[in-house]
Amino acid sequence: MSRIAYVDGRYLPFREAKVHVEDRGYQFADSVYEVCEVRGGRLIDKRRHMARLARSLAELRIPMPMSPRALGVILRELVARNRIGYGIVYLQISRGVARRDPAFPVPQTSPTVVATARPLNMARNEALAEKGISVVSVADNRWGRVDIKTVGLLPNVLARQTAIDQGARDAWFVDNDGNVTEAASANAWIVTRADTLVTRHADHAILRGITRGVTLDVLKAHGLTVEERGFTLAEAYAAREAFETSATQIVMPVVNIDGHTIGDGKPGPVARALRRDFHRHAEAG
Ligand code: PLP
């Protein structure tokens, strides 16, 4: 079965799914995106993803091209046309096509809307989570507004490749104060020796992950101690557990950071329980 993509009002075979060379997403990364998990053919936490998308667009003064409900219809149609049971949908909205000039184009410029869907391999993801992953730390050299989910991801690309080149799976960014901000495409967490869950507070220096938000709700509902604050690499190396959260991985245990074994080198009980229970709390739409 051939893959189908959505481009500006049309569902197209992949090889015909193209945007203009002067699209501002292509030329300036003047574009925002969302990635949403699909499970059992349903979009997970769609409402939260749509709310974050609306915020990203508003922060950049890109007009919302259609209602969140209409975007939801497109995403569901794409899931159906691509017959995705378990996988992801990707939605990108750029400021549109205009003659190359950094200043905003005329207000009548229509945003470009692109969406794709693809299956993920559940067995492979589960096997990875059973073992846990290794990460390496890298300097956080991103711009000051990574809370906006833009496609300006070059530092994330380089960080991920640095991790792979060093035989690790992912990279954790560390800011100038020596605190971990987040992973290259996930939020970073530790469980301290005192059983406190710690993840960086959601300021402009991290993306407010949807999976992070649901996880925080779960933890608070269970009365667990959570601190939203920066934590150092030294704290992470000495942690009982570490893990990262994202829509594509849900809760992924981290068992090694910069060559330091975390806990006993196996996924810990907190990360395992959070992963197991996540979809009881997430919203399937
Ligand atoms: N942080 C960054 C930099 C990301 O790119 C992502 C997801 O792509 C996340 C965090 C996790 O966000 P979410 O849980 O919404 O997938």
Image: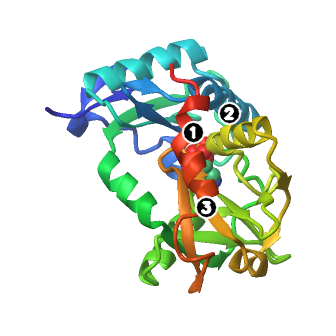
Reply above or below: 256 against 215.
Answer: below
Report the Cα–Cα distance between label 3 and label 2.
Answer: 23 Å
Residue 282 position within the rendered picture, expressed as x and y whole percent measured from the top left: 59, 30
- Between residues 98 and 92, which one lies in front from this camera angle? 92
Ligand 1 within 8 Å, label 1 CB: no
Label 2 CB less than 8 angstroms from ligand 1: yes
| Labels 2, 1: front one | 1
Residue found at x 34% / y 46%: 122
Dot 2, crowdedness within 10 Å: few (<14), some or many (≥20)? many
Front-lying residue, 67 or 186:
186
Mark drawn on residue 52 = 2
Q: Earlier in the sequence, mark 2 or mark 1?
A: 2
Residue contact at pointers 3 and 2, CB within 8 angstroms: no
Between the residue at mark 2 and the residue at mark 1, the CA separation in whole angstroms equals 20 Å
**Is the C-beta separation of discs 2 and 1 under 8 Å?**
no
From the image, tell me which residue sits under label 1.
278
In front: label 3 or label 2: 3
Give the secondary structure at mark 1: helix
Position of 154 compared to 215: left or right? left
Q: Nearer the viewer, residue 241 or 43?
A: 241
Image: 246 above or below 2: below
- The three-letter code of the residue at mark 1 reads Phe
Mark 3 vs ligand 1: CB below 8 Å: no
